[in-house]
């Protein structure tokens, strides 16, 4: 915002001054030439000097201002981060350290501002000095011409008067130049943001269907890298039928979150293709595609506003009854009614006034209302607190009913009952199958499971399952 303000100044004030100065400058110059050519030619020396100074200053000031804008931005975001993360800072007793870091940035900001101010002051004095030299030249050479009778004293006085008119716009233009350098640095930052583009766009002829998607998902030799050639997912192929429940497990950093983020096209694949209902996902309009996919993350995001607004976040044209129905399915209705203003309760900044379990149930209600065909649960279950766990698990069970579901869970006990488990390691699907098949295989899944449960218990479970199937 302060960058925009800076740019605004040059447009409102700078532009008018610039036009006025240019006209006055050339007008005065023209009259000076008419009055006396030789004196005007002599005047070119100090004016060229001024031009040279302007060039040097402009370059230096621009670099200085660029730094000023950058540090100002850093200062603001550091302030925001510190306020936003005040709990963590207190928990680690980092107040002093954070303050010191902030002061350091503040001092840097101070220094660079002083540097630019000094630059401006030096430059200003040089301009005044060179202007005075101009007067000196005119009085010296002009005075001699008056003495020899070449020009009248009236001409000299008029000349000096117009010379003043020539200098005034030069000083004003300097001021504009000063504003301009500040605005240029601000403009670079603004356009840096405005010119950033998203790679993910609707492709030509993309469609949105009048009906919901069924929810068949197919990955075909999918490769994906966040940065060039550094593949996070390699040759991923699988097929999921509508309504199937799929679990993705694997060590941290294996690429599970990345894989599911490709389905709503948060990123586009580098190679390979993803299909939903036998159509490439790129052939759907992004808005339509995302309206068919529900996502619940570990830390459900709650916006400031009322509970009602938060539940209707994904779908706004709904009746009150639908919202209540969704909240009931999410096991949230009871606690909402106990809040001071029920559904109209303000939840505070980012839902500060709610517990994590309550936030999660609101997030679930949101998905119920949206009613997507495909559901993604990324680590959702890992931060459940014991008290609300059963309530949430019950709501989740209702939620996954009849949808294609991708579950990412570290707690493997939660993925036992899914239709199929994909085990990811370093960006590749290394094992796939049901819980029992994978346990029998004694591969990576077995190892991961063993990290959470003792060997005897697993062996017992396998033998029990063996009897059943
Ligand atoms: N936005 C990003 N930019 C660059 N690299 C990323 C980005 N997000 C993830 N990565 C990298 O991609 C790899 C896979 O990350 P991903 O988040 O998919 O792992 P994960 O399997 O979900 O791990 P976890 O179980 O810890 O959540 C990691 O090496 C990670 O460093
Ligand atoms: Mg993850």
Image (cartoon, helix red, strand yellow):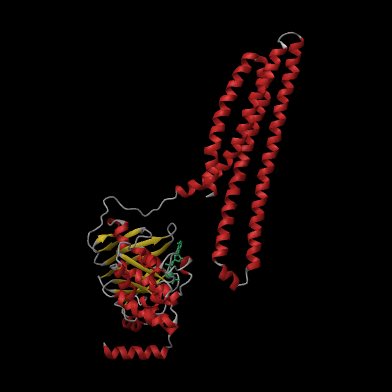
Q: Is residue 273 visible?
A: no
Q: Is residue 469 left or right of residue 20?
A: left
Depth check: 42 or 352 in front?
352
Q: Is residue 417 left or right of residue 105?
A: left
- Return the residue found at the far top: 149
Depth check: 48 or 104 in front?
104
Q: Is residue 404 left or right of residue 257?
A: left
Depth check: 129 or 451 in front?
129
Residue sitting at 67 percent across and 15 percent down?
38
Count of numbered marks:
0
Residue sitting at 39 percent across and 66 percent down?
310
Quarter containing ligand 2?
A: bottom left
Q: Is residue 96 above or below residue 189?
A: below
Q: Quarter-wise, where is residue 129 in the image?
A: top right
Residue sitting at 59 percent across and 73 percent down?
91
Q: Quarter-wise, where is residue 400 in the image?
A: bottom left
Q: Is residue 86 visible?
A: yes
Q: Position of residue 127 (x, y in %)?
A: 68, 32
Q: Position of residue 334 (x, y in %)?
A: 37, 78
Q: Position of residue 115 (x, y in %)?
A: 67, 46
Quadrant of the frame with the C terminus: bottom left
Residue sitting at 55 percent across and 58 percent down?
77
Depth check: 453 or 233 in front?
453
- Return the residue found at the far left: 211
Q: Position of residue 300 (x, y in %)?
A: 42, 70
Q: Is residue 256 above or below residue 190?
A: below
Q: Is residue 4 above or below residue 272?
A: above
Q: Is residue 357 above or below residue 373?
A: below
């Amino acid at each position: 915002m302060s960058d925009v303000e800076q740019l605004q100044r040059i447009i409102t004030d700078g532009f008018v001054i610039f036009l006025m100065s240019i006209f006055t400058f050339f007008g005065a110059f023209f009259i000076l030439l008419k009055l006396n050519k030789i004196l005007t030619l002599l005047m070119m020396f100090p004016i060229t000097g001024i031009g040279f100074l302007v060039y040097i200053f402009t370059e230096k000031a621009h670099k200085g201002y660029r730094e000023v804008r950058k540090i100002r931005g850093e200062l603001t975001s550091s302030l925001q981060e510190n306020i936003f993360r005040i709990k963590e800072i207190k928990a680690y007793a980092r107040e002093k350290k954070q303050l010191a870091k902030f002061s350091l940035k503040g001092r840097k900001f101070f220094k660079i501002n002083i540097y630019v101010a000094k630059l401006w002051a030096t430059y200003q004095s040089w301009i005044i000095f060179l202007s005075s030299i101009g007067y000196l030249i005119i009085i010296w050479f002009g005075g001699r011409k008056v003495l020899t009778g070449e020009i009248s004293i009236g001409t000299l006085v008029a000349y000096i008067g117009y010379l003043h008119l020539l200098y005034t716009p030069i000083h004003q233009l300097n001021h504009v130049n000063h504003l301009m350098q500040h605005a240029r640095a601000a403009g670079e930052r603004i356009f840096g943001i405005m010119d950033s583009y998203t790679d993910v766009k609707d492709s030509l002829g993309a469609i949105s269907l009048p009906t919901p998607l069924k929810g068949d998902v197919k990955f075909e030799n999918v490769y994906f890298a966040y940065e060039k050639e550094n593949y996070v997912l390699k040759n991923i192929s699988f097929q999921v039928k509508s309504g199937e429940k799929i679990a993705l497990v694997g060590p941290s950093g294996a690429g599970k979150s990345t894989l599911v983020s490709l389905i709503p096209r948060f990123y586009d694949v580098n190679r390979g293709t993803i299909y939903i209902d036998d159509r490439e996902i790129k052939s759907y309009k992004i808005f339509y595609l995302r309206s068919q996919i529900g996502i619940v993350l570990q830390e459900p995001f709650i916006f400031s506003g009322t509970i009602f607004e938060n539940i209707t976040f994904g779908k706004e044209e709904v009746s009150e009854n639908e919202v209540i129905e969704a909240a009931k399915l999410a096991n949230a209705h009871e606690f909402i009614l106990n809040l001071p203003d029920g559904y109209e309760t303000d939840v505070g900044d980012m839902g500060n006034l709610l517990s994590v379990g309550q936030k999660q149930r609101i997030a679930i209600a949101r998905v119920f209302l949206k009613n997507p065909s495909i559901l993604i649960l990324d680590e959702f279950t890992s931060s459940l607190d014991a008290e609300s766990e059963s309530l949430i698990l019950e709501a989740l069970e209702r939620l996954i009913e009849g949808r294609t579901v991708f579950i990412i869970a570290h707690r493997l006990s939660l993925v036992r009952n899914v239709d199929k488990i994909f085990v990811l390691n370093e960006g590749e699907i290394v094992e796939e199958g049901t819980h029992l098949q994978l346990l029998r295989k004694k591969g990576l899944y077995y190892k991961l499971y063993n990290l959470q449960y003792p060997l005897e218990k697993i062996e017992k479970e396998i033998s029990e399952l063996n009897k059943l199937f």
